[in-house]
Image: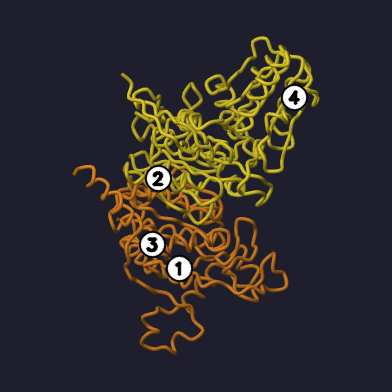
Chain colours: A yellow, B orange
Amino acid sequence: MSNNTYKLIQGNEACVEGALAAGMRFYAGYPITPSTEIAEISAQKLPVVDGKFIQMEDEIASIAAIIGGSLAGLKSMTATSGPGFSLMQENIGYAAIAEIPCVIVNVQRGGPSTGMPTSPAQGDVMQAKWGTHGDHPAVALTPNSVQETYEYTIKAFNIAEKYRTPVILLMDETVGHMREKLQFNDSSEIEIIDRKKPTCSPEEYMAYKPDEDMIPKMASFGEGYRYHVTGLTHGEDGFPTNNNEISGKLIQRITDKIEKNIDDMSYYDEYKMEDAEIAIVAYGGVSRSAKSAVDEIRKKGIKIGLFRPITIWPFLEKQIKSVSEKVDKIYVAEMNLGQYSLEVERVACKSCTVNKINKVNGELITPQEIIDAVTGGRE
Amino acid sequence: MNCSDITKKYYRVQKLTHIWCPGCGHGTLMNTVIRAIDKLGLNKDDVVVVSGIGCSSRAPGYMDFNTLHTTHGRALAFATGIKMANPKLHVIVIMGDGDSSAIGGNHLIHAARRNIDITTIVFNNNIYGMTGGQYSPTTPTADFATTAPFGNIDVPFDLCKLAQGAGATFVGRATAYHAPLMQKLIEKGLQNKGFSFIEGLSLCPTYYGRKNKKGNAFNMHSYFKDNCVDLKVVQKNPEKGENKILIGEFFNGPKPEYTESYQVIVDKFKELRRD
């Protein structure tokens, strides 16, 4: 018999529950609406499980601290929102090039700048991919419910650990503050992935020499493998180099280890897509409105479905292409002025038309707005 | 231990020679860190050396410990995460003057305020060397730099006073010329269970020295020799401190250490689980 339990909780709380289930034992953060509950609940729950919490002086310090914590052997996370996410960008790049697993939660709010702190938005989609300078891998997951926040926080940790890369959980205020039933899975049913550890002698250890899967084994500081970590381009021994060939190979490898394993992290959901002639593409909070809209529009005899990416980055090119070859029209609904739609257009424009449904006034896109956009407002 | 034994034991010999210019004081200061670690007999596997960006921050690459070369100004924030995650590690942070007090000033005061057990060593050469000689928060007023072509109008920080005011529980200053004192201060800093701050005055003949007509490395060392006075001397004879640079141990006042205070909370829950 399963030991599943249920609880009515908020998305931000589910994020912490998922993180703890995944093995998070260090959290460093700075208060910011609408993500603060993640820090508060982490502060409450971490010492109970022998974990550590610290409130840092700013978001730059927060992500720096979790990179340090991860390097010292603890699964680590930070959470923030727009302005804080902007401050974290440099060190997200550091985690990418130094290949330090960590999870960064961004509960999106209206921007730019201070914007609308208590209102939902999805304006950080492109920032999650291109926020830090230079070419780098990007993984971002977007849950649309309390249950998914729990499950995809666990998956975020698993991807971070498996691929030694920072992973972004791209929530939005709607999902972060929504209260729903959460089913806690029996811990024996949850898949937990831990980073690969070296088994060789310290003398033989090459901290950045990849295995065949492109991922190097990671020793924690203090385990007897004394090695060097730097944000400079480095060789397989971890030491800085200006060698063009080695530098180029490093950037290619850290990108390839994600892009070439995209099938291992391609999460998405399809709703009534079997016979669809029109597809709505929506993610996060907006996808809840889109699902209602699909049901309503179908009542008018229009064959419409919903394609919902949960993995926002890397871009689900294969799946979007396949949707575009099946339908005549795609509507991308998102709480920004058109960000994910740019990627959809790039892949789908040869096969079907791509339309945009956008809103940036701090309100969730409603089902009616999607219905009106698709049916031209004709009732 | 003689010089070559220390070199073989604590340096990544294959990574030498270092990148620093001829006459730079950083190599001497790095060696005082190594000798302090040797004197205390710390296990190399338990020592972590973290740095930011700049000339000084290249030091950890040459040192055979767990070493982390981070982003500009952020070394203390990375080090805080390491120390929180594994308080058993001896965490040493090496930063430059710009690194620690301009871009990283906020992290410096907050790490000091928390009194987290990190030994912070600043190689202060009064200039941004890696980028070619711009004025830093410790460049004296009226001195020249590539970005102060008409003389610096900024007022410099006294880094030791800053650290002490922010809550550091061990504070001292020495110079690349006063290497034995520097080593002694680092030893005491490493022994202090809390945030220790040691400023090592370095010299940059290439940029700061050249821009300000300070002569060669010999002249700059001589300047330290002739113009530094230990606090203990000044306390007895205040007139000897006039227009001099104070060196020595400035403050040693233990307070509860951050990771130990956190552990008290963790242990309470452990007891509850046992009951």
Alpha carbon separation for disc pair 3 and 2:
22 Å
Instruction: Give the chain of mark 2.
Output: B
Can you tell which of label 4 and label 1 is closer to the viewer? Answer: 4
Q: CA distance from mark 3 to mark 4?
A: 53 Å
Find residue B259 and report its horizontal and vertical position in percent. 34, 54
Say which chain tag 4 marks: A
Other residues around mark 4 within 10 Å, as few (<14) / some (14–19) / many (≥20): few
Dot 2 amino acid type:
Asn
* Mark drawn on residue A346: 4
Instruction: Calculate the distance from the C-alpha at mark 1 to the C-alpha at mark 2.
Output: 28 Å
Q: Compare residues A361 and B223 and report the one nearer the observer.
A: A361
| Distance (Cα) linking label 1 and label 3 | 9 Å
Q: Nearer the viewer, residue A264 or B151?
A: A264
Mark 4 → mark 1, Cα distance in angstroms:
53 Å
The residue indicated by pointer 3 is B115
Which residue position is annotated with label 1?
B166
